[in-house]
Amino acid sequence: MVKDYYNILEVDRSASERDIKKSYRNLSKKYHPDKNPDNKESEDKFKEVAEAYSILSDKEKRGNYDTFGDPNGQPQNPFGDMGDMNDIFSQFFGGGRNPFGGRGSRRKKGGDIRINVHMTLEDMYNGEHKTIKYRRNKKCGTCDGTGGESTTCGNCKGHGVVNQIQKTPMGRVQSTVTCPSCGGTGKIITNPCGDCSSNGVISSEERLSFDIPKGIMDGESLRVTGKGNSIKDGVDGDLFINIIEKPHPTFRRSGLDIHQRVNLSYKDLVLGSPIEVDTIDGKIRMTVKSGTQVGSMLRVPQKGFIRDNQRGDMIVEVWLDIPKEVTEEEKKIIETL
């Protein structure tokens, strides 16, 4: 079934880009793994929110999703996919064959794998070439994923399904069910593979190198097709790389903008002063005007994150540096002021 990405992000279908981004920020903070340690439900919700944002924040994908119900522009069957229809007919008629034709099953897909990658703000700003190691079930090279030498199942003659007669209050009903002898594969293993114990897959440590694009956001996921778990007589699952932002001692990100707090003296706020501040790509000098109030936010254009030909700003939050200890002479000067 198609996911309702608008519902996941808790916004209307007419929501603006600003509303979508705002809701994503709030929800990703709410379900962030660092705030909900060892909470599988929150982790799954965090990934789901990131997936929804990756679709609705992309104009092309959002347009396809609104038009076809699919971000890749593939029209969706209003009754669901044929696998769903087969499940329905299997429940009601007990079979793997349905009135629309077909054997009643689609090719199985191996399980997806999700891996968290923790990144510094600097690496997210610059992009990074990364290499990771992880374990997955991989097609056995000895038997090429078949599980061993096999022969056609004599019970179903290789069809994977058999007819079954059931007595019901309405009389005798014939239905088509998965063959109990071969499990629907149409084959019986006669000489099991010794390396995979006829499973068709073995556990393997994988090494994967990939590029993380500049400007990626906390909670986003990169999808690597076919690098998930393999499955016997099926297609490989996918690998999802979840990006987790490490806390930064100076900067705090908000969309494409970068915030930082600067503590200034009473004199600098009253009289004004040139100051030197850090940005993510080096130091700059700026001027604090006389009479600047505590809590003011000074914007430095074009010193934030870069993404999709857009660049954010640096927001300098001004705070008062109050000394914890003062001398008697300093007290008299302050009282005089």
Image: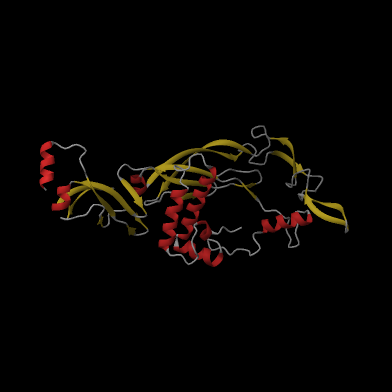
Residue 333, horizontal then vertical, whole percent = 10, 43
Q: How is the image coloured?
A: secondary structure
Can you say which quadrant of the picture contains the N terminus? bottom right
Quarter of the view holding residue 187: top right
Residue 224 visible in the displayed image: no
**Relative to 168, residue 114 above or below:** above
Residue 35 visible in the displayed image: yes
Residue 106 versus residue 295: which sits nearer the camera?
Answer: 295
Q: State the residue at coordinates (56%, 65%).
A: 68
Could you tell me how many numbered marks the image carries? 0
Q: State the residue at coordinates (37%, 47%).
A: 124
Residue 31, horizontal then vertical, whole percent = 48, 48
Residue 11, horizontal then vertical, whole percent = 48, 61
Left or right of 37 on screen, residue 245: left
Q: State the residue at coordinates (58%, 36%).
A: 203
Left or right of 256 on screen, residue 161: right
Residue 160 versus residue 112: which sits nearer the camera?
Answer: 112
Name the outermost residue toward the top: 194
Residue 69, horizontal then vertical, whole percent = 56, 63
Name the outermost residue toward the right: 171
Q: State the residue at coordinates (63%, 65%).
A: 78
Residue 195 versus residue 288: which sits nearer the camera?
Answer: 288
